[in-house]
Image (cartoon, rainbow, N blue to C red):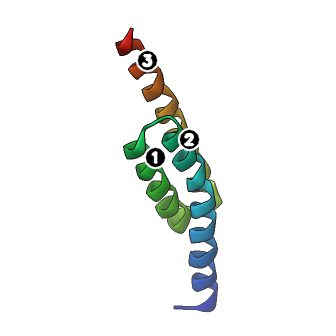
């Protein structure tokens, strides 16, 4: 493994971790732990594979899923 590849993997992991905190925190606050941890690990993997470019859409997708799952659960309670 060349140093450039290793550097990309390390920075991709860090970026994925930081972007994964968005769905993790949002999901835990809204009582959606499955989506929270799923989004967190999906962002880490997306960050490793594609860096910031694939980590942002993964974070946004899981944030949107958590928001919509929260809205659906409120509809069922009424």
Give SS at disc 3: helix
**Residue 73, position in %: x, y?**
39, 22
Q: Quadrant of residue 50?
A: bottom right
Tell me what residue is drawn at x 52 percent, y 49 percent.
24
For label 1, the crowd category at 10 Å Cα-Cα, with few meaning under 14, some 14 to 19 and many 20 or more, is: many
Label 2 – label 1 distance at C-alpha: 7 Å
- Seen from the viewer's position, the closer of residues 29 and 9 is 29
Contact, CB < 8 Å: mark 2 with mark 1?
yes
Taking the view exactly as shown, the residue that stands out farthest to the bottom is 2
Q: Which residue is mark 1?
A: 36
**Residue 52, position in %: x, y?**
64, 59
**Residue 28, position in %: x, y?**
49, 43
Q: Which mark is residue 74?
A: 3
Q: Which residue is mark 2?
A: 26
Tell me what residue is drawn at x 57 percent, y 91 percent.
2
Q: Is residue 6 above or below residue 28?
A: below
């Amino acid at each position: 493994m060349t140093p450039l590849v290793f550097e990309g993997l390390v920075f991709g992991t860090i970026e994925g971790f930081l972007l994964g905190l968005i769905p993790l925190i949002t999901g835990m606050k809204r009582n959606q732990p499955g989506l929270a941890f799923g989004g967190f690990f999906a962002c880490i993997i997306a960050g490793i594979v594609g860096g910031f470019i694939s980590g942002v859409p993964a974070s946004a997708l899981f944030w949107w899923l958590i928001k919509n799952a929260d809205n659906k659960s409120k509809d069922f309670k009424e």
